Amino acid sequence: MRIVIPVIAFAAVSSVPLFATSYYLYLAELAMINVVVALGLNLLCGNGGLISLCNGSFMAAGAYGTALLTSEAGLSGLAALPAATLLTSLLGAILGYPARRLSGLYLALVTLGFLELVQIAIEEYPDITGGIRGLKVARPAILGLSLQSETALYLLVAALTAFAIFAAWNIQKSRFGRALDALRQSPFAARSLGIPVARMKPFAFALNAAFAGCAGGLFAMVTGFIDPTEFGVLESLKHITFIVVGGLGSVAGSVLGAALFTALPEFLRGTNEYSELVYGLILLGTLLFFPRGLAGLWERLPALPLQRAASKEPVHGAS
Amino acid sequence: MSWQILSQLGISGLSIGSIYALVGLALVLPYKASGAVNFAQGEIVTFGAYMGLVLTGLGLPYLAAVPLVLLIAAAAGALIERFLIRPIMAGPEFTLVITTFAIGIVIKALIRLHWQDNTFTLDAPFIAPPFKLGALRLNPAYLVFVASMTGISAGLSLFLAYTKFGKAMRATALDPIAARLMGIKPARVLSSAWGLAAALGALVGLLLGPVIGVNPEMGHLILKGLVAAVIGGFSSLGGAVAGGILLGLLETYAGAFWGATFKNLVPFAVLILILLARPEGLAGPASARRV
């Protein structure tokens, strides 16, 4: 049973190209890319309780990395994507290493500063990055086989998303994942249990950056065009919205939140100017009234009548 | 470069630094009282500017609109604290940070819904051609910036040092439980701190709007205010003022000597360097808390 459900789900997802129009295919690809982003961020924020406002920058590093490694260094798409993912992960570690002494507000500020630096770097070096005018990304070729066909690219995204879900699930259940949970609940208690708190933060950032970098690379391939506004602070907050609404610290929550918010503009079609307002209100409402997100609601559902008596349970992450 | 140009740059650095200092104050004040940084403060600046636009549009002169806008903003700030911040104040810091961001997104989205992305002009009496003082050219708006910053910092420190309510605010910031035992109502202190900060933010919008034009991106200024607060150690009002002025001067001179790219990089480079090397700020005492 534990194998069957994922297999069926994957088969269902990968059969989408058989019947969907190319627009819905594109939408499904974006949804899966957002799932990958959310999974990584949820490990860092949901499990580790660390605040990162620069997730967009990691995505940018992956996107620009993949694009430039393909066009400038002449790598094939199959080589450029993992290389860019690795480089982004390294960038995450480089940011996480000096930030290992920081937490809470100060971490939020450092990551915000980092995000702005990356934005400025992209805008001020238009010779390489295309600046604010953006950068065209060639469709990748893999093993000499061009991903010109939409189906092939779709399947690549689906396969990598499946792998990301599998990886995130296992990381969460691993020793490292449990250590992250301990770190969120109390860094002091975690330390006294022998968890090397300071050493974990660079790893957590590197891990998150790897997910975001891979997602960024896929994003560049799928959209064929990237510009810095796709990776700003508002985008980083959207990523946070995915995991807050889906459920902090929950793999299912990441998937649910990312899929839901990619589809949201579709529901709001014709009223696009409201989309930011809706985003903000949903985020605000979730934080205030359902701090554990959709995944938390789901867990509470069977016990709802009993919940009244036991509703004094601690809020997620309260320490 | 002659002393004339250097001091001309110094004046513009000082005046923009005054704006940063005011935003920094508006960030530090509620942080001291509630331990939460209001990342929506930038949008409150924008809100103040648009409120000024509305009231002057109704025919009020600028100077009469200012106190009204400050009152509206103070009420809004107190309401935000009461209904959105206080319920989650005991929660994790992650929730607090993201909630204030979400409030900012909502305010900005509402403003953009009504006014779109246009830039509006707001008339103010201090928009006048620069006048000459010796060899220097002085822009009256710059003088107003510096004067507002000086007046407000002085007023605020007098208020905190000598009034009963100011003392209650300081006591609550030091130790909320002890303050409560002394008969101070922490809830009132919290609401007032947020209200005061919102009024300060709106004032920045009213000062800056006439100079740069009222537009929905004004809130970006919060980044400079954050840097100012960080330079000062984030819990010191005087530090935030000094930090803002330092940042303004640094930015202006860096821009003049090394160009616009460098000018844009400076604030964030300073932010990251200080947080990594001296998170307690340039003047703050070294902290012993390590995890």
Image (spheres, coloured by chain):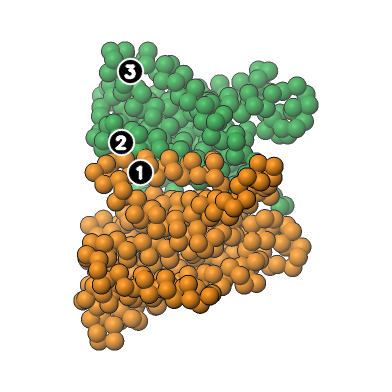
Pointer 1 residue: A276
Give the percent coordinates (x, y) of residue A109: 51, 50
How packed is label 3: few (under 14 Cα within 10 Å), some, or many (20 or more)? Answer: some
Q: Which residue is mark 2?
A: B112
Task: Determine the secondary structure under disc 2.
Answer: helix
Along the line of sight, the residue nearer the viewer: A70 or A212: A212
Q: Chain of mark 2?
A: B
Whether label 2 touches label 3, CB < 8 Å: no
* Residue B3 in the image, given as x and y percentages of width and height: 37, 39
Distance from disc 2 to disc 3, alpha carbons, whole Å, reads 18 Å
- Whether residue B16 is visible to the viewer of this picture, yes or no, is no
Residue under label 3, please give it.
Answer: B55
As drawn, the chain in green is: B
Q: Chain of mark 3?
A: B
| Marks 3 and 1 close (CB-CB < 8 Å) | no
First reached walking from the N terminus: tag 2 or tag 3: 3
Q: Quadrant of residue B219?
A: top left
Q: Residue at x 41, y 32 (%)?
A: B45
Residue B188 vertical position relative to residue A62 in the rendered view, above or below: above
Chain given the colour orange: A
Query: Residue at 69% of width from left, 45% of height from top?
Result: A310
Relative horizontal placement of residue B81, taking residue A57 as reference (left or right): right
Q: Are marks 2 and 3 on the same chain?
A: yes
Q: Is residue A15 visible?
A: yes
**Amino acid tagged 2:** Arg
Badge 1 vs badge 2, beta-carbon distance below 8 Å: yes
Mark 1 and mark 2: span between their CA atoms? 10 Å
